[in-house]
């Protein structure tokens, strides 16, 4: 079996989920050959793990918790012109590597290369159109969100099947749309005991971990946490983004990327994060108190936070961060009780494999 994956490089959530899917496939079909078309963070993640082809992809500009729509359009204005080059590059490689199926996230190159190769395309992404319909009943929708949802709808329609990992109880599959449970890299029980991990990580007390992802969007969150950290008798460990130029408070540690993040999460008191599905799912499965800051107008993140609103603390702004953090720390025991009631199984990779097998047989 030969599989071509096309994945975005904006953050690390998409490549880590795809990595788990590949590992699940390899368990059952060890001779499967993999090729990954990727860029930026996903290229750095995969280049020493599997054969890769480097492509051009999206650029999300800015550091705030709000997508700068005009600037994003300007930064990506020449992106469609690169798709032809990307397709030609992959087509040349595919003279020796003819995939049985193309698996893509929101990269438009995925469905396009599938059509060129005359192969099926499975699209894998966390935007849930059914949850969006529910959200619309109670919230106003601006033009930026409408543009995003229209874009996702078009991509889903271009694929033979859209597979959506969700944070809630799965709905029944329907034509060209199927749901799976979250995908988790390692379960808590697969890691050492907390006392052993504390020694291994050289931690004196349980930290509060802050996960930003791989892009610069959301840097504002880390900067605001760092400004007020001195007022708290807590240790903060920040992961992700590009913060090398910041002078951190004495009780703040920074890792741009650390593959051992889940070890830190297991021993942590709580998790502060944006609303990326991967990190939220990990926080829920690890039964941690979660403080979430969804990026404004980022509909997938908005829906993730909306889905988990009964389990986590959600803040729409970093203003008044000292007050927000103080409230979060006080409510950690209460929030942990809520996450302990979260029962969704993290077996999404196995469910994805079943859908892949069906697609290959049809």
Image (cartoon, rainbow, N blue to C red):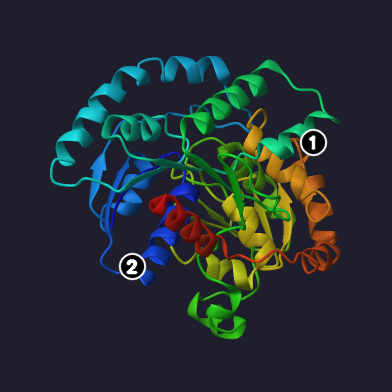
The residue indicated by pointer 2 is 29
Up the image or down, 94 lies above or below 297; here it is below
Residue at 50% over, 74% down: 201
Indicate which label's residue lies in the foreground, 2 or 1. 2
Q: Where is residue 222, by image quadrant?
A: top right
Quarter in which the N terminus is drawn: bottom left
Label tally: 2
* 48 sits to left or right of 325: left
- Spatial CA distance of label 2 from label 1 is 39 Å
Up the image or down, 204 lies above or below 272; here it is below
Which residue occupies the foreground of this view, 238 or 44? 44
Q: Position of residue 272 (x, y in %)?
A: 67, 53
Q: Position of residue 91 (x, y in %)?
A: 20, 34
Residue at 31% over, 32% down: 113
Q: Is residue 257 visible?
A: no
Q: Position of residue 143 (x, y in %)?
A: 68, 16
* 244 sits to left or right of 206: left
The residue indicated by pointer 1 is 134
Q: Is residue 184 visible?
A: yes
């Amino acid at each position: 079996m030969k599989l071509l994956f096309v994945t975005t490089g904006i953050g690390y959530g998409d490549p880590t989920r795809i990595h788990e899917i590949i590992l699940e496939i390899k368990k059952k079909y060890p001779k499967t050959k993999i090729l990954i078309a990727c860029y930026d963070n996903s290229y750095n993640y995969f280049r020493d793990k599997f054969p890769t082809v480097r492509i051009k992809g999206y650029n999300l500009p800015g550091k705030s918790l709000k997508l700068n729509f005009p600037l994003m359009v300007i930064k990506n204005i020449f992106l469609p012109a690169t798709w032809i080059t990307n397709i030609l590059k992959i087509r040349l490689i595919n003279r020796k590597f003819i995939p049985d199926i193309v698996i893509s996230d929101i990269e438009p190159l995925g469905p396009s290369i599938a059509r060129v190769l005359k192969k099926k395309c499975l699209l894998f992404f966390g935007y849930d159109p059914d949850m969006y319909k529910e959200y619309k009943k109670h919230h106003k929708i601006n033009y930026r969100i409408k543009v995003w949802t229209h874009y996702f709808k078009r991509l889903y329609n271009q694929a033979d099947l859209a597979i959506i990992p969700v944070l809630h109880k799965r709905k029944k599959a329907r034509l060209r749309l199927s749901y799976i449970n979250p995908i988790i890299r390692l379960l808590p029980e697969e890691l050492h005991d907390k006392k052993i991990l504390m020694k291994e990580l050289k931690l004196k007390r349980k930290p509060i971990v802050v996960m930003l992802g791989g892009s610069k969007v959301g840097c504002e969150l880390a900067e605001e946490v760092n400004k007020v950290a001195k007022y708290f008798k807590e240790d903060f460990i920040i992961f992700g983004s590009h913060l090398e130029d910041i002078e951190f408070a004495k009780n703040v540690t920074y890792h741009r990327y650390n593959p051992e993040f889940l070890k830190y999460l297991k021993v942590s008191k709580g998790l502060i994060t944006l609303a990326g599905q991967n990190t939220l799912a990990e926080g829920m499965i690890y039964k941690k108190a979660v403080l979430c800051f969804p990026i404004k107008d980022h509909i997938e993140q908005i829906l993730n936070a909306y889905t988990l609103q009964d389990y986590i603390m959600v803040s729409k702004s970093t203003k008044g961060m000292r007050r927000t953090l103080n409230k979060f720390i006080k409510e950690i025991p209460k929030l942990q009780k809520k996450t302990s009631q979260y029962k969704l199984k993290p077996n999404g990779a196995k469910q994805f494999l079943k859908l892949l097998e069906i697609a290959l047989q049809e």
